[in-house]
Structures are given as C-alpha cells and as structure tokens.
Amino acid sequence: MPALARATELRQQRVKQHERYKEILDRVQSEGRALTAEERVELDKLDESMDQLKDEYERIERAVDRDAEIIADRERAAEAAGDGTSPDQVGDKQKQYRAAFQRWLAHTPAAPMMQTGDLELLQEGRAGAQIVGTGNLGGYTVPDEGMKTVVEAMLFIGGVRRSRATVLSTATGADLPIPTDNDTSQVGQRLSEQTEETNVVDIAVGQVVLKAFKYSSKIVKASIEFMQDTSLNPDQWIMQRMGKRIGRVLNDDFTYGPGSTTGPEGIQWYSTLGLTAASASTIAWTELVDLEHSVDVSYRTGAEFMMHDSTVKILKKIVDGSNRLIWLPGLAVREPDTILGYPYVVNNDQDEVGAAKHSLLFGDFSTYHIRDVKQFAVVRLVERYVEFGLIGYIGFARHDGRLVDAGTNPIKHLRHPAS
C-alpha cells in the first residue's frame, strides 16, 4: 500500500473512533447524567488510540515530505554546481560523505574502520567543517541527510517548532536583525485636483535581533562493540539522541526563555494577555471565542492554538451552544485536527490548566521566529572513555527564538485566576 494511502486509512480509522467518542458524550448529555466508570474507561482508551493513530500517520507523512525535500535539495545542488552535475551524482556524493561520516563515528585506535581518503572527503565535502584539532579528536558537521534526522527529532519533541513559526536557517551566527514598524495609526487622505500633498509622516522602524546561543547535547556514550556491530545506522542513532536532547532544551527556552541577551524569548511569557478565565480548573467554550476575538482579525488568518496535551483532553469534551463538539479530527492527508475551526499544536512545556496558569495561546505563530545556524557539529571523544570500552560523542548547535511584535500583539494567552 502506498505510504499516503496508508496515512489516509489511519486518519479514517481515527475519525470513526472520534464518532464513537462523540456518541458516548451525546448520550450522556441527552440523558442528563454524569459519565459512568465504564464510559470514562472507554473514552480514555479512545483518547489513547486516537493519539497513537495520529502519531503513526504523521510519521508517514513526515517521511514522505522528507524524501521530497532530499530530492529537491539534490536538484538545487546540481543546479547551483552549474557544471553538468546531475541530481543523481549529487546524491552519490552525499551518500559517500555520509558513509565516511559513519565510519568516522565508529572508528577507534584499536579497530580502525575508516578507509583511505575518508578524512579528505569529510574535509573537502564540508569546507571549513572541521572545528577542533585534527585526526581522532576532529569534529565534523553532520551530513545533509543526517541533519534531516536531527531536525525531525527536534520537531517531534518541540511544540513551538511544530507550530507555524518562521524558521530561518543561516550559514553563520552573526546577529540577524528583523525590521519592524507600526504604521497602523496613519490613514491616507482624499485630495482635490491639483492639490499639493503637504503632510509628511515619518515611519518609525524598529528591529528584533536574532542571536546564536550555543547548545550542547551533553555526551552520548556508546560501546565500541555497538558502533562496530550494530545493524542500525549508527549516525542516525546518535543524531536522534542528540536532536531530541537539544530539542527538549530548545522547546523549554522557546516556551519560557528569559529573552534579552541571555537566551531565546519564551513565547508564553512574551505573548500578551487576551482573556482571564472565570475558573482556575476548566475553560468554557465562550472563553475560547473571546480569546479568538481578542486577537486582531489580521492575525486570525492562519492562526492556531497552542496548549499542553492535558488541555487538549479537556477541550475534546467541550461542546458549543448547539451541543456540537468544538474539537474535530482532520480527515485528509496533512489536514490538522481543529478547535473552533483552528489547528492546534501540543506543547507539553506549556502550563496546564490551573490557578494563575497560562493554559492557552492563540494567534499568528509565524510571527515567532526561530533561528538555526546551519552547521550542527559533532565531536568524537575516543580517548576519554577508552578504559571502559566506550566512545563519547557530543553535538553543538546554535539557535535563537524571538516573538516579532510590531506593536499589535499577534499572539495572546488565556490566564486562569489565582483561585
């Protein structure tokens, strides 16, 4: 079965489970009673199953998209070369680089596995990629296909990155200014024929500066035997762990970061208040509507919600004034689930529903800018753990995140009262 056909089938299974979910809630509502213990158990099982199905079809869709990106990267590289290099030849070179990178990862003084010319291939394949020393202590940037693994790992962990945030990839870590201006108070005017325009209004232009804060994966250790004998791709295994570790700390910073010169701006703290809920323990559907309309209409095209998974569970059971569930599953391939017709992103670093918490964000998340410095460097520590028969690896990456608000508050939050 083609990959996307399988994804569609899984989506349809999930819709059927949602219909069963709604059937139970409708019956309880019509009978004017509370859920029974058996119904609560069934709803919890349906919740878990729907989450598993979503995870599975999203993995399939990401794999299809990643394949397309790799092919497009090869075509762009071939076009940029301008020397008749075909996309297939670019692909062959990338495979050679990745194979050399894998051998470099698994190499130890006691059991050399690298082939003649591998170091030259690594150095020539990434001009300026070597970051520390030479030989066994050298560090090299991750090959392109390996970077897809790192980005996917960070995407899977990172709620903010999975939103419609604007992701900028730069070759260096120099300051990256994003210009802003707020001209919303100015209105044009009607002129009579042959009337000279005398009004001059200066536009105040500001800027948000994206920096490049350094992050470490901490040391990943693997046995020499594992690196030499594993049937897994050792580079993928290492990259996934590094990507997830860095993804976790990045998402925490993108959610709660202090901003200024010390780190990224957390989207939760740098959003503005849209609404204070009436309850510290739940959310009413009318409050969702009020939060929606607290955001200027110009930011509601392409807007989305962001919340903790436990908040999603609460909203799945809320109905509107016509007794319709406000949560609906996406049916078509790549079609997202929605709340009040808007897609949402799960971010488990965000506040859960509770006293004085900010449990919901809503608005145009493309105004949150994530900056990635393109080169993700890996250093291999061969001698540090040699007496234990282990090899250490550590990854370094540079990132920043800033909410670009020109003054009209594109993202707002719902806050619960203190009690």
Image: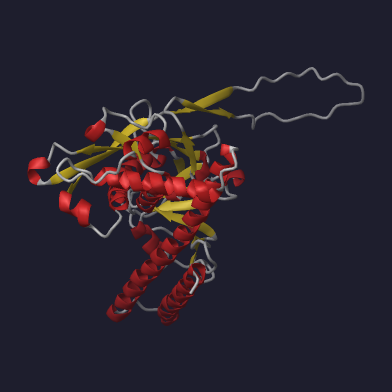
The residue at the far right in this view is 193
Question: Which is nearer the eye, 104 or 375?
Answer: 104
Q: Is residue 378 above or below residue 194?
A: below
**Residue depicted at x 46% and y 78%:** 16
Q: Is residue 329 above or below residue 27?
A: above
Q: Is residue 46 visible?
A: yes
Residue 370, percent across and down?
45, 38
Q: Specify the color scheme.
A: secondary structure
The residue at the far front in this view is 116
Residue 369, percent across and down?
47, 38
Question: Which is nearer the eye, 228 or 111?
Answer: 111
Residue 322, percent across and down?
54, 70
Residue 37, percent across and down?
27, 78
**Relative horizontal placement of residue 220, taking residue 148 as reference (left or right):** left
**Residue depicted at x 58% and y 49%:** 300
Q: Is residue 84 above or below residue 174?
A: below
